[in-house]
Image (cartoon, rainbow, N blue to C red):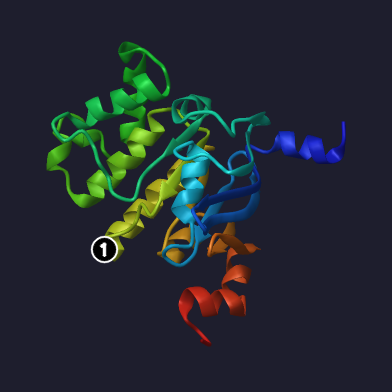
Amino acid sequence: MSNELVTTMQQLLVLEQLHKSYGSVKVTDDISLSLAPGEALGIIGPNGAGKSTLFNLISGGVSADSGRILLAGQDVTREPVFKRCRRGVGRSHQIPHPFVKMTVFENLLVGAAFGANQTEKASYDWCAHVLELTGLIRKANVLAGSLTLLERKRLEMARALATRPRLLLLDEIAGGLTEPECLELVETIQGIHRGGTAIIWIEHIVHALLAVASRLMVINFGRKLDEGEPRAVMSNPRVQEIYLGIGS
C-alpha cells in the first residue's frame, strides 16, 4: 500500500479536485483539501466565493460535477444527505430554522432519531448531554420559537450535534451576534472541539475563527487562494487585497 493511500485513509475527510458549475458559472473550481480527525479548519472568502456550495457538496445537498469526496476512507461522492449524516457529517445553517412549535429538547430528539438513526428513548441521555454542552439545558422544555437569536444559534449547533457527528460543519454560525454573544459562542465551539469533534467553520468574523481553527483556507471565485497557518494566511498580500480590501 502506497504512503499516499495510507495518508488518505487516515484522514477524516478528503476532497479531490471538486468541480461544481451552474451553467457557465464555476462555483467550485478544482477544490482539494484534507481534514484529520479532530482538526478544526476555518474557511473565509468574499460573498459569492462558493463557500456554502462547498458545504453543500460535503454534506450531500448538491452533487459534484466531477471529483471525489472521501469520508474516513469511504467514497461518499454520490451518497445522499441522510447517509452522510449517519456516517458522521453534521451541519448547521446560516439562518436557524428550528421546529418552532416543538421544545428545544424535542428538536434535538428529531436530529438524534433521524440523523443518528436511534430510537427516541435511546437518545434521551445523549440529547441531555448535548444541551449541557451547548448551554441550553435550562431551555430544554421551552418552545424553540421563543428563543433569542443567540439561543437559536446554539440550538442550530445542538441539533447537528444530536446526530453524533465526527465532522461538524458550521456555516456562519456567529453572523448577526453582538461581540459578547460571539465570544460566548466561541467558548462553546471550543468546548465541542476539545471533545474531539472535527470542525470546518465558514465565517466572516475572522477573530472568532482564529480562536478555534488551527488551519485557514481562503476561497475566491470557487478556487482555493491560500491555505495554511491562520496568521500566515491572513498576512498574504493577495488575501488582504481580496478579502480585506487592503492595497486595492
Quadrant showing the N terminus: top right
Q: Nearer the viewer, residue 31 or 201?
A: 31
Residue 208, given in percent of the width and then of the height, sits at 43, 61
Q: Nearer the viewer, residue 228 or 31?
A: 31
Task: Identify which residue is drawn at 31% across, 19% down.
Answer: 124
Q: Which residue is mark 1?
A: 178
Q: Quadrant of residue 11?
A: top right
Q: Give the amino acid at mark 1.
A: Thr
Task: Identify which residue is drawn at 35% across, 46% down.
Answer: 93
**From the viewer's perspective, is residue 83 above or below residue 197?**
above
Q: Looking at the image, can residue 134 be seen?
A: no
Q: Is residue 185 left or right of residue 143?
A: right
Residue 179, given in percent of the width and then of the height, sits at 30, 65
Task: Identify which residue is drawn at 60% across, 80% down.
Answer: 237
Q: Is residue 198 left or right of residue 118?
A: right
Residue 84, given in percent of the width and then of the height, sits at 51, 29
* Furthest-front residue in this view: 23
Residue 240, given in percent of the width and then of the height, sits at 54, 77
Q: Nearer the viewer, residue 50 or 159?
A: 50
Mark 1 lies on a secondary structure that is: loop
**From the viewer's perspective, is residue 232 above or below residue 78?**
below
* Mark 1 surroundings: few (<14), some (14-19) or many (≥20) residues within 10 A: few
Q: Looking at the image, can residue 128 be seen?
A: yes
**From the viewer's perspective, is residue 182 above or below residue 192?**
below
Q: Is residue 34 left or right of residue 131?
A: right
